[in-house]
Image (cartoon, rainbow, N blue to C red):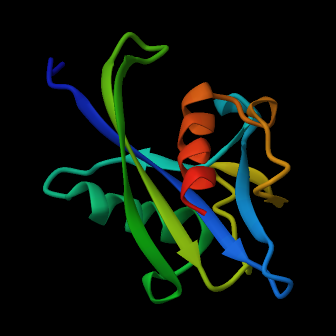
Amino acid sequence: MSNQIKRKIQVAVVYCDQSKQKQLLLLKLIPERGGHWQNVTGHVETGETLQEAAIRELIEETSISQSHAQLIDAKFSFDFTDRFKMERSEHGFIAWVDTNIIELDKTEHTEFKWISLNQVTKEDLGFSTHWDLIKIVKERE
């Protein structure tokens, strides 16, 4: 097994509805993976940039194509050790999208919801680092 730090990304997906209210997309993981609510997340594949991984994961997990998203580097990253004792480095992005039509990858998530950016709380999420990224979104709105 490699000692190399594995890179990950997370993407906070935001949609502005007809009343100009900002809605945040939350995805619920399958029970085998924790069953909690989260942002779009994933691993960076060999040869991929962080931005390429963020776009790929957005498409894979939500079916929102790159043409419907403006991806912004949140300048947010952190290192951690995961539950398998693997060293990880995660980088955050914000995707402003012009659609709220989602098609889930049912191998990873059981459901999704759009929640008002003003109403989402830390308790809505499974990881505090997802809340940290959402706080950045709130600061930039």
Q: Is residue 40 left or right of residue 6?
A: right
- Front one among 22 and 67: 22
From the image, which quarter does the N terminus lie in?
A: top left
Can residue 102 be seen here? no
| Quarter of the rendering containing residue 91 | top left
In the image shown, does 140 or 17 lie closer to the viewer? 140
Specify whether residue 50 is in view. Answer: yes
Instruction: Say which quarter of the image contains residue 101.
Output: bottom right
Is 48 on the left or on the right of 103, as rendered? left
4 w.r.t. 104: above or below? above
Q: Residue at x 61, y 63 (%)?
A: 141
Residue shown at 20% from the left, 58% from the top: 49
Q: Position of residue 116 (x, y in %)?
A: 83, 59
- Measured as percent of width and height from the top left, residue 85 is found at 38, 10
Residue at screen point 58% across, 51% down: 139
Out of 13 and 139, give the one closest to the viewer.
Answer: 139
Q: Residue furthest top?
A: 85
On the image, the x and y values in percent for residue 124 come to: 80, 37
Q: How many marks?
A: 0
Q: Quadrant of residue 104?
A: bottom right
